[in-house]
Amino acid sequence: MIFLKNVSLQFDQKVILNNVDFKVNQGDRVAIIGESGCGKSTLLKLILGFLQPNNGDVLYNGVSISSMTTSELRSMRMKVGMLFQSAALFDSMTVGENVAFSWCENQGEDYDKVSDKVNEVLEMVDMAGYADDMPASLSGGQRKRIGLARTIAMSPDVILYDEPTTGLDPILSTSIENLIVKLSKEFGITTIMVSHQKSTILRTVDTIYMMNDANLIYAGTPLTIEKSDNELVRNFMSGGL
Ligand SMILES: Nc1ncnc2c1ncn2[C@@H]1O[C@H](COP(=O)(O)OP(=O)(O)OP(=O)(O)O)[C@@H](O)[C@H]1O
Ligand SMILES: [Mg+2]
């Protein structure tokens, strides 16, 4: 489904990714961890085709992203949803219009005709009844859930989550974690998550990759990671997260 093949990327002289091989199959749930600035968000941007590697290739369903036309890139991005850390809502639109954005903007639907579907998606993120509110009146956690609702509304095959639970209280974190797992299990959505939150990583994914010094240095599972032979990984899980 998503394949980074020998990918290297540098900004100016600085190597950010060095010969990274990373493969995610349909339905997988994976997390990428590593210290701040190690290149996690950069890796997500490569998957979305916002950045191109200096060497190697990024493939989506077997097709090289660098060979895609503008319209192929656009359709790929409609299948690969991204939940930004900041939620990135449109502040001049209501919550409902934000959620309906892909239906109205990409599919030309009338907002009035999709309002039932909007309410269904809002219910999934525990935000029923907020369709007419403005984003500015919401808390950080509520904005995050609306961001997720907008992503879900695209019916994506893949969701990239950048820090989905950072800044949320433990109860909200758990509800987002449950929702991420539910989306994966019920709809087969492939999940790629960047997170520093240990509880979220351990509860949500099947495979954890760690990046260090521009390389993927470790792949493990929530059951094995804390007993890893790799000291860097163990230290990161006990103190770094
Ligand atoms: N457009 C850019 N131009 C130059 N350098 C960049 C650019 N984008 C990112 N970098 C550098 O690449 C490195 C990796 O950045 P990235 O945002 O991927 O880190 P990260 O692992 O997501 O960190 P964090 O956990 O803090 O979000 C950093 O050193 C950053 O300064
Ligand atoms: Mg980042």
Image (cartoon, rainbow, N blue to C red):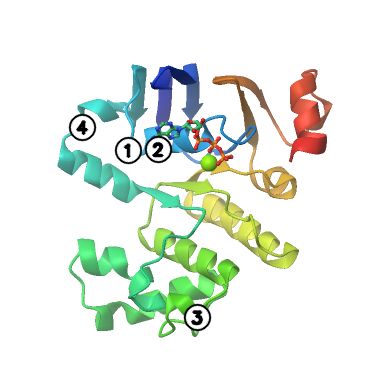
Question: Which of the labelled discs sits on residue 45, or is there none?
Answer: 2
Q: Is mark 2 within 8 Å of ligand 1?
A: yes
**Residue at x-position 51% and y-position 81%:** 128
Give the amino acid at mark 4: Met
- Percent x, y of residue 217: 63, 19
- Three-letter amino acid code at disc 3? Ser
Q: Answer with the quarter of the image where residue 101 lies.
A: bottom left
User: Which numbered disc, 3 or 2, marks the residue closer to the eye?
Assistant: 3
Q: Quote the CA–CA distance across marks 1 and 4.
A: 12 Å
Q: Which label's residue is closer to the chain start, 3 or 2?
A: 2
Using the image as rendered, state which of residue 187 and residue 80 is in the foreground.
80
Q: Which comes sooner in the sequence, label 4 or label 3?
A: 4
Q: Residue at x 41, y 58 (%)?
A: 151
Badge 4 crowding class, 10 Å Cα cut-off, few under 14, some 14 to 19, many 20 or more, is few
Image marks 1 and 2: residues in contact by CB distance under 8 Å: yes
Identify the residue position indicated by label 1 in the image.
Answer: 50
Rounded to the nearest angstrom, the CA distance separating label 3 from label 2 is 30 Å
Asked whether mark 1 and ligand 1 are closer than 8 Å, the reply comes as no
Q: With respect to residue 146, does 82 lie above or below?
A: above
Q: Which residue is mark 3?
A: 137
Residue 4 image label: none
**102 to 55, vertically: above or below:** below
* Mark 1 surroundings within 10 Å by alpha-carbon count, few (fewer than 14), some (14 through 19), many (20 or more): few
Where does residue 158 sit, x and y in percent of width and height? 43, 45
The quadrant of the image that shows the N terminus is top left
Residue in the image at 20% along x and 40% along y: 72
